[in-house]
Image (cartoon, helix red, strand yellow):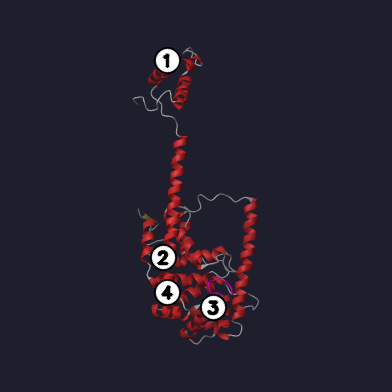
Amino acid sequence: MSDKNRSPDLSTLRAELIADIEALSDEDLLREAREAGEDILKIAGEVRSSARESAASVLRAGLASAKSAAAARRAGRAPVRPKLEELKRLVRNALTHQPGAALAFREGKAVSDNDWQTLYDDLVSLGAIKSGSHED
Amino acid sequence: MADSGSGADVFATSGDIQEAIESLTTTEAYRLRKIARVLIPGSEYQDPRELLNEVFVRAMEGAAGHVGRRWPKSRVLFSAFVIETMKSLVDGSRESVWSTRTASFADAELRATGSAVASISSPSVEDQVLEEESRDAARRAATHAAAQIENHFEHDEEVSLLLECLKDGLTGAKAIEACGFRDRTHYETVRRRLRRGIEKMFPEGEPT
């Protein structure tokens, strides 16, 4: 037999408590509820309502998480640029209409493709070129 | 959108779980709450609602493919899944006084799918210290609850005998044979007295 100083194993004890409640017939369950002065309809309603709210909270959290992930994807997305020749045409056109900006550019001399693309992105962000105004 | 696991298992979707919640009958819902009540003494849960809600949250998270509990709806009734998950949570939430052998099917599902552990990062030293302190507190709480139960029944020889059997991990037929209960009916009568006594001791799951 066991050492008196040991405590009951809560895990085994819990399994037995569950087994006892599962063994109760619905009639026994109702009788125990009456004896304990419990309103079974009210308690069952609370369980369902609380469960419904818990489940909904997970769905809401999932939706919020999906929204913020989509926003992060949009923020980190590489800029969509037209083909290089079209890009240069749009930049030249924008600079023609904004001479001040043109001074800051090196008049097309030894300008790398990367410079064109960076300038294009800057002009798009300044609103001088409307993103998506190109054909591709 | 049902997801097939190994073998013939079909796991529930979020919609299945919501539907099952709506389909709980009055006696099923009341029975679940009654079980939650007797499970929480010695656990980190203070209220049966808190434990039940945790189950539904875990189930929904599992259905969404996150860390959680997945309901194998093709072979387990929803109520049984809720009960097993509650038990698994309380046994895991506070370390059992000495037993760690209870591995529910819900835990097994998590291990089998592997999806649960993928996103868990290694804990920091501070987290480990906190976790250890939490475990110590858990052990103390579980030991305290167990001692309260033993003391409560010290003048009831039969229930004390049943508690002795449980200390040895003996239940059912083994307890009847080893601990001298006359028969199954006798064993179940004593077990019922134990359960009802615990319900009175912990009216809302907390010690009086």
Q: Are marks 2 and 1 in contact (CB under 8 Å)?
A: no
Q: Secondary structure at mark 2?
A: helix
Q: Secondary structure at mark 3?
A: helix
Residue closest to the far bottom? B182
- In this view, the residue in front, B180 or A31, is A31
User: Circle 1 sits on which residue?
Assistant: A96
Question: What is the spatial separation of the Cα atoms under label 3 and label 4, in whole angstroms?
Answer: 17 Å
Q: Which residues are magenta?
A: B199-208
- In this view, the residue in front, A119 or B149, is A119
Q: Amino acid at mark 4?
A: Ile
Q: Chain of mark 4?
A: A
Q: Is residue B80 left or right of residue B201?
A: left
Q: Are marks 3 and 2 in contact (CB under 8 Å)?
A: no
- In this view, the residue in front, A57 or A99, is A99
Q: Give the percent coordinates (x, y) of residue B123.
A: 60, 51
Q: Give the percent coordinates (x, y) of residue A76.
A: 47, 35
Q: Secondary structure at mark 4?
A: helix
Q: Which mark is residue B74?
A: none
User: Circle 3 sits on which residue?
Assistant: B200
Q: Chain of mark 3?
A: B
User: Circle 4 sits on which residue?
Assistant: A40
Question: What is the spatial separation of the Cα atoms under label 4 and label 2, in whole angstroms?
Answer: 12 Å
Depth check, mark 3 against mark 1: the one in front is 1
Label 4 environment density (alpha carbons within 10 Å; few <14, some 14–19, many ≥20) = some
User: Circle 2 sits on which residue?
Assistant: A48
Q: Say yes or no: labels 3 and 1 on the same chain.
A: no
